[in-house]
Amino acid sequence: MPTYEVHYFDTSGRADLQRMLLEVAGASYTNVFLNWRTTWPTVKETTAFGVVPKLTVVESDGSRKDLYETSAIEAYLAESLDLMPGPTAFERAEALSVLSALAELEDKVRPTLWLRTLDERKAGHATYCTETVPKYLKYQERFVRGDWYFGDKLTVTDLKLYQLYLWYEDMYSSYDQNPFKVLAADFPKLNKIIATLDKGKAGEYARKRRNFGKNRWIAKDWKFGRK
Amino acid sequence: MTTYELHYFNAAGRGDMSRLLLDFAGASYKNVLVQNADWGTKKDTTPFGKVPVLVIKEADGSTKELAESAAIEAYLAEVLGLVPGSSPFERAEALSVVSAFLDLEDKLRTASTGTTSEERKTAHEKALAETIPMYLKYQERFVRGSYYFGDKVTYADLKLYQIALKLEEMYGDSSPLKTKAADFPKLTKIVETLAAGKAGDYTKNHRIIGVLKWFKDEWKWGFAA
């Protein structure tokens, strides 16, 4: 059985889903935290593409291999941890297509995070929550094929949905503006997946091992900041 | 024999890479071009309201469809024999190379979001001087043989080739693959080898540029009549 190292900063960020996959699968993993100022500049040059997260797979014979880029890491872990709908190329690609669409929705809010004024950020988030999110989630709701995205089996796609929900909680819970909750009546299947995951291992990860205490949302400023 | 339909707009855009893979591998495929006027009706028939969509028609007559360019490309790479190996790790490594290039493409898209051509020009000049060379430096270091993964062409090499085409279309002789070719000998050799073969044939004979063109004085993509 391999063990894993997740190399990233001490925030959920782009490592959140990987950590969640490892947790839900009961895999043995450790977080190797990078410090933006001290260790990151040196580690950066050792990475394949100048970015983290990096996943290190440590095999039982002690050999190590590194994998970069969140979409590649997530695809690899989903397959290795039996969190894909099935073993065929098509089944795995279908899961990747859901991840890709959800990642696109996730990316759409990023420019708003960096807008310079408070008013711009508030307006940007309002538009995102009321217009952008429902446009994307409508297709996601339609896609769900059972209790989970792919029927009876929990897969990486369900966990991606939950990871997105958690990020919205980070940003919007202080204003009761999480679009999954505000629009609950429009997205019953998606919300059922979230509720089920929240009660299990994914929820436990979210409450106990997802936040490292440093990076959090500052409600009055509508932005993330470090303590 | 499996046949494919690639549904996308009359443009290179996010359909180009899938078309290149199908063409390069000699797959039986056709392009179904979506006209802007028809998009309103077609949109909701697609899994996520977007194109490209790949329709796969198996020999037994069954069909299935796949959306999202990243998923379509990963799927085609695997079924067309354009991955370094069959293990999850090998396929994920190839995906990581492609993903890094997708990140670069996103940065170039962002450079065109400024509201004035002056802003966009400044952003693209910075991309040419700094961002693109920085991404290419890591890519150059990654290459492990004649091709990204040794002796065998994979979709990582074809992604590089597609990026080279895009940089050429956008920046012409100012493309950092040309101005800084000496810094990227391995990448340059891959592009040249592919250009001399089936990828080059695709570009000359089957590549669709269509209605989406780079307007160089505006520093953005737009629709040509």
Image (cartoon, helix red, strand yellow):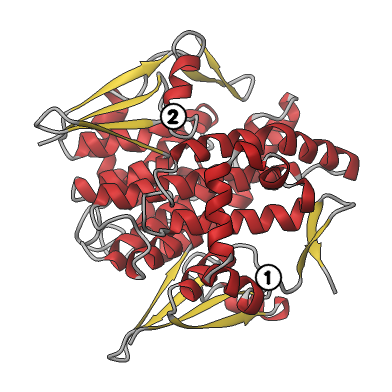
Query: In the rendered image of this protein, does residue B173 appear above or below residue A174?
Result: below
Quadrant holding the N terminus of chain B:
bottom left
Q: Position of residue B191 (x, y in %)?
A: 57, 56
The residue labelled by disc 2 is A52
Q: Quadrant of residue B50?
A: bottom right
The residue labelled by disc 1 is B11
Q: Residue at x 45, y 46 (%)?
A: B97
Query: In the rendered image of this protein, does residue B219 appear above or below residue A200?
Result: below
Q: Secondary structure at mark 2?
A: loop
Q: Nearer the viewer, residue A36 or B179?
A: B179
Q: Is residue B5 left or right of residue B113?
A: left
Q: Which amino acid, mark 2? A: Val
Q: Is residue B174 left or right of residue B152?
A: right
Q: Which amino acid, mark 1? A: Ala
Q: Position of residue A168 (x, y in %)?
A: 48, 36
Tell me if mark 1 has few (under 14), some (14-19) or many (20+) residues whose alpha carbon lies within 10 angstroms of its own.
some
Q: Position of residue A11 (x, y in %)?
A: 42, 22
